[in-house]
Amino acid sequence: MKKHEKYTLTYVPDAKAFTDAPDSLAVLIKQRRRWMNGALFGTMKVIANITKVLSCKRTKHPVYKQILSFSSCFITLLISCFNSSLLVLCMLQLLSS
């Protein structure tokens, strides 16, 4: 969104959303892999820029909350690595049986 534009955000209670579910296991696996890669690289970017995050003067969050947020990003990174490995192991098991 552009800065200083006259956008308004409103809640629409009767709004409907639709999604296309993957129609095969292979498409689901590709989708999940893309999501995990996005989460992994996004988390890595936050961790790589932690000094910028902690030294930001625009935030009103105390440093301890920022450190907690960084810690959760680091834990998410570790879990993402294991998720990718578990996905590959599960798929190998499914394909071998």
Image: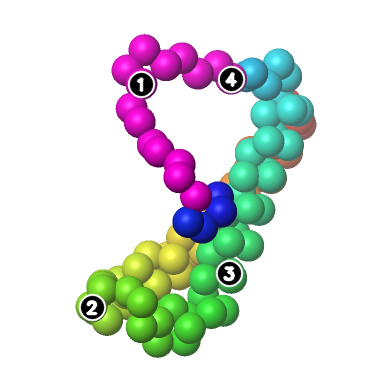
Give the mark nearer the N terminus: 4 vs 2: 4
Q: Nearer the viewer, mark 3 or mark 4?
A: 4
Quarter of the rendering containing residue 27:
top right
Give the mark nearer the N terminus: 3 vs 1: 1
The secondary structure that most of the magenta stretch takes on is: loop
Label disc, if present, on residue 44 of the rendered structure = 3
**Against 33, is 59 above or below?**
below
**Against 25, is 9 above or below?**
below
The reply to whether the C-beta atoms of the residues labelled 3 and 1 are less than 8 Å apart is no
Q: Is residue 59 magenta?
A: no
Amino acid found under the numbered disc labelled 3: Met
Q: At 47% across and 86% down in the image, what residue appears?
A: 51
Label disc, if present, on residue 19 of the rendered structure = 4
Query: Along the horizontal axis of the image, is 19 left or right of 13?
Result: right
Cα distance, mark 4 to mark 1? 18 Å
Q: Which residues are magenta?
A: 5-19
Q: Residue 8's x, y, as percent?
A: 40, 38
Amino acid found under the numbered disc labelled 1: Val
Q: Which residue is mark 2?
A: 62
Of helix, strand and loop, which one carries label 1?
A: loop
Amino acid found under the numbered disc labelled 4: Thr
Q: Residue 17's x, y, as percent?
A: 50, 18
Q: Residue 24's x, y, as percent?
A: 73, 19
Label disc, if present, on residue 12 of the rendered structure = 1
Compare residues 94 and 79 and report the one nearer the observer: 79
